[in-house]
Image: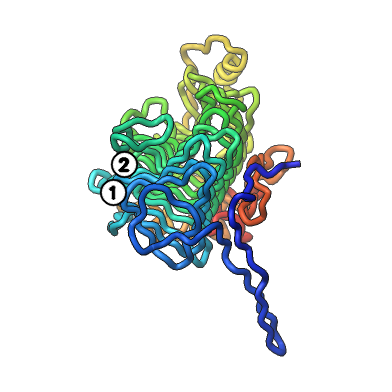
């Protein structure tokens, strides 16, 4: 049985009694918002130590670096706006919980307004998304819970100042949008948004993770991943929409030497135009990446015009013996995309085609050289110097997944990287989409790891969404991503 890892006994947790009002033919029941400790004042800019509750409907300004101390909790009710000054940091040593809602999301971002440049054909050099206005939410190893529900986190990636930075950081370093580093702690992110970062939008150095139904746009300027998890990280990355990431959109690595072994499931995610802003594209991905001893399962993902498909790395090697993948759907407007759905450099990557993939690259399954390279990698031998790559020319512009509002093949642009944000697009599937019903919900192939250990009903994951049979993050029955 899972045990609660966070004690709130030292906190003044206000739950309140149920309020009921009655009319002759209707009962209306409302639950008061959760409050922990005292209300945080919005009368002046915040700095130094902060704890308690930010109240619904209020706007708070962070004028200088702030810290949630070990043993303290900062809770944001729904409908809270937090404006952060340029270059400032939110450092979490205790617990931070943001409980936005669908009707009243929370916003954590700059203390000034930027005009978003989300149209196709953007210039990344002039894009405000890559300004790195504030550092982000940085958690110390003592942070036992970072939880974001229906929360926007925007314009992160500033360099740390001379005296205020998290463990594993130093003065002058660029920051991640969110940084979590507790192997016995929980990082929960649901139904939220991240827009604009310089390096990784999220770096989980170690921790139990639940990242579901979020939207990531413009993550990484000339490098950096959307979601990068390292050794000691276990959990699920599912039903997320990634658009215009610089390098890998979601990546798992066992680098770092912290137990347990990295084990991450990535299922029912949608990846659009990923992998094109990186400085050094050699051997890099664009959608899904497993490397350096990481394991997990990757199923039911939808990848459109990304630089690479599912990438299982061999130098340093992922734990290919203890992972599985399949039922992944790829569409590409160019031969470059379709020729890199499966890697063609077996000395560094060992992704093997699956018969359940769409398109089904059945011709390659009978290629003995490719099979041999993969088997050599499993036993640790030397790969052949030459392996015949497959030819993806027959699949270019084939299998349009039929988004509700996103034209494929893409027209009016010069680069596949020109799409970097959701903007006015709608990446849900039309009723006639060939991606509907082509995934798997077979529990023998993929089930959520459901790794987080928070059991308090107010703070545990709202929903661990099971794998769905429609490819990508939007399901035709209305489940999955709600953005």
**Quadrant placement of the N terminus:** top right
> What residue appears at the point 47 percent right and 37 percent down from the top-left corner?
140
Residue 226 can be seen in this image: yes
At mark 1, the secondary structure is loop
Q: Residues under labels 2 and 1: Cα distance? A: 8 Å
Q: Residue at x 61, y 32 (%)?
A: 263
Q: Position of residue 451 (x, y in %)?
A: 65, 40
The x and y percentages for residue 273 are: 40, 44
Give the labeled residue for mark 1: 86
Q: Does 188 sit above or below residue 282?
A: below
Q: Give neighbour class at mark 1: few <14, some 14-19, many 20+ (Cα, 10 Å).
A: some
Looking at the picture, does residue 250 appear above or below residue 320? Answer: below
Between 417 and 356, the one lying in front of the other is 417
Category of crowding for the residue at label 2, using alpha-carbon neighbours closer than 10 angstroms: few (below 14), some (14–19), many (at least 20): many
Q: Residue furthest top?
A: 382
Counting residues from the start of the chain, the first of labels 2 and 1 encountered is 1
Q: Residue furthest left?
A: 126
In the rendered image, residue 29, in percent from the top left (x then y), is placed at 66, 75
CB under 8 Å between discs 2 and 1: yes
The residue sitting at the bottom extreme is 24
Quadrant position of residue 15:
bottom right
- Mark 2 — residue? 158
How is the model colour-coded? rainbow
Q: Is residue 131 toward the left or the right of residue 92 in the image?
A: left
Residue at 66%, 81% (x, y): give it.
Answer: 21
């Amino acid at each position: 049985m899972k045990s609660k890892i966070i004690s709130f006994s030292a906190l003044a947790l206000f739950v309140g009694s149920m309020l009921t009002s009655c009319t002759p033919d209707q009962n209306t029941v409302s639950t008061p918002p959760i409050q922990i400790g005292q209300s945080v004042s919005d009368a002046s800019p915040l700095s130094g130590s902060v704890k308690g509750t930010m109240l619904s409907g209020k706007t708070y300004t962070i004028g200088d670096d702030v810290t949630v101390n070990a043993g303290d909790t900062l809770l944001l009710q729904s409908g809270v706006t937090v404006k952060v000054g340029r270059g400032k940091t939110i450092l979490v040593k205790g617990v931070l919980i943001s409980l936005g809602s669908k009707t009243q999301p929370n916003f954590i971002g700059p203390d000034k307004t930027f005009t978003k440049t989300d149209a196709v054909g953007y210039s990344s050099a002039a894009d405000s998304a890559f300004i790195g206005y504030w550092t982000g939410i940085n958690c110390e190893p003592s942070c036992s819970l970072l939880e974001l529900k229906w929360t926007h986190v925007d314009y992160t990636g500033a360099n740390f100042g001379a005296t205020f930075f998290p463990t594993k950081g130093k003065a002058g370093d660029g920051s991640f949008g969110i940084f979590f580093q507790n192997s016995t702690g929980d990082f929960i992110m649901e139904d939220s948004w991240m827009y604009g970062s310089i390096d990784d939008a999220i770096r989980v150095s170690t921790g139990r993770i639940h990242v579901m139904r979020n939207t990531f746009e413009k993550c990484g300027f000339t490098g950096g991943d959307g979601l990068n998890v390292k050794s000691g990280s276990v959990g699920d990355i599912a039903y997320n929409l990634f658009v215009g990431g610089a390098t890998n959109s979601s990546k798992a690595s066992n680098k770092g030497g912290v137990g347990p072994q990295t084990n991450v499931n990535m299922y029912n995610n949608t990846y659009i135009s990923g992998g094109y802003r990186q400085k050094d594209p050699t051997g890099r991905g664009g959608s899904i990446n497993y490397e350096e001893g990481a394991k997990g399962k990757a199923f039911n993902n939808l990848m459109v015009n990304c630089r690479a498909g599912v990438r299982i790395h061999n130098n340093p090697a992922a734990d290919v013996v203890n992972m599985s993948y399949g039922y992944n759907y790829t569409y590409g407007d160019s031969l470059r995309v379709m020729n890199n759905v499966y890697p063609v450099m077996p000395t560094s990557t060992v992704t093997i085609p699956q018969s359940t993939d769409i398109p089904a690259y059945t011709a390659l399954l009978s290629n003995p050289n490719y099979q041999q390279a993969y088997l050599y990698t499993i036993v640790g031998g030397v790969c052949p110097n030459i392996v015949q790559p497959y030819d993806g020319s027959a699949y270019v512009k084939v299998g349009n997944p039929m988004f509700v509002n996103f034209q494929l093949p893409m027209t009016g642009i010069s680069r596949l990287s020109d799409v970097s944000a959701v903007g006015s697009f709608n990446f849900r599937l039309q009723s006639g989409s060939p991606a509907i019903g082509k995934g798997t919900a077979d529990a023998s192939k993929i089930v959520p790891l459901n790794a987080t250990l928070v059991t308090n009903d107010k703070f545990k994951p709202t929903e661990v969404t099971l794998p769905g049979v429609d490819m990508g993050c939007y399901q035709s029955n209305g489940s999955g991503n709600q953005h």
